[in-house]
Image: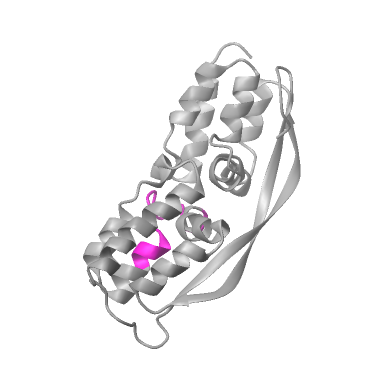
Amino acid sequence: MTDHGPGTPFYFHTKLDQTILLGVRAKNVKQLLHGIRTVPESSIYHHTHRFLLQHQYLSPEPPNDFAYWVTEIVGNAALGERLASIDIVQFDSIAVLRERFADILESCVTSEEYRPETNHGDDFHFMASRTFVIPTPFVAHDLREFMDILGKISLNALYYHVFDAKLRLGKGENDFSRWLRDQARDDIADKIKRLDPYAQTLEGLRRRIIGLLGRDDRN
């Protein structure tokens, strides 16, 4: 997307992710806490968002990797439930999201409610995603073109402009809403911003956004 101002076209981009093994692992909850505090933000993002692309047809509200490992491998269902209950949509930065996970794990470690060590081969391996942003041939010059193109772009492109823009890129708002504000369409921008992208599939999110755009009669 190119900033800013009325009449500025919207340039659609897509992305490719390369998963990287960081060489950091945890055998128990205390080590998981240490890893969460020290790994790069791209790792926190990877372990809380990768399910949205990989399993978006299977579950509209997938768990994060930390909650899954604590529940299924460590065997601490109560702690896993607390980690799974974190409402990711409420966070505008990875730094604050990281602290939320750390706070929950800190309370567990302090009270010693964790198994000292998992079985061999069951370690939690911290990973990260290296993202390659790729321009697409799609450019929207007005609301009508924007709506038409939105129906054609890949799910990776949709994901990039909605999720990556808000959290990984630290913009605090998805690219679509930001562009609509530049076009003096705060009404639609606000409606799209209020959508919960985590509570539906990416295809469902695409349909919701197109539906909101289709109700507008000032193209």
Pinpoint residue 20: horizontal percent, then vertical percent: 61, 69
> Which residue does the image show at 43% across and 50% down from the upper left?
97
Left or right for 8, reference 205: right
* Residue 99 sits above or below residue 117 on the image: above
Instruction: Decide which of 63, 39 is in the foreground and name it.
Output: 39
For the record, the magenta segment spans: 53-68
Instruction: Decide which of 23, 205 is in the foreground and name it.
Output: 23
Q: Is residue 64 magenta?
A: yes
Prevailing secondary structure class for the magenta stretch in the rendered image: loop
The image quarter containing residue 131 is: bottom right
Q: Is residue 92 magenta?
A: no
The residue most toward the front is 110
Instruction: Decide which of 87, 141 is in the foreground and name it.
Output: 87
> Which residue does the image show at 46% across and 68% down from the upper left?
35
Viewport quadrant of the C terminus: top right
Pinpoint residue 18: horizontal percent, then vertical percent: 65, 64
* Residue 181 sits above or below residue 194 on the image: above
Pinpoint residue 119: horizontal percent, then vertical percent: 35, 86
Is residue 57 visible in this depiction of the protein? no
Pinpoint residue 49: horizontal percent, then vertical percent: 48, 54
Is residue 104 visible in this depiction of the protein? yes
The residue most toward the bottom is 120
Task: Give the number of callouts.
Answer: 0
Instruction: Decide which of 169, 186 is in the foreground and name it.
Output: 169
The residue most toward the top is 218
Q: How is the image coloured?
A: one colour
The image quarter containing residue 181 is: top right
Viewport quadrant of the N terminus: top right
Left or right for 59, reference 142: left
The image quarter containing residue 32 is: bottom left
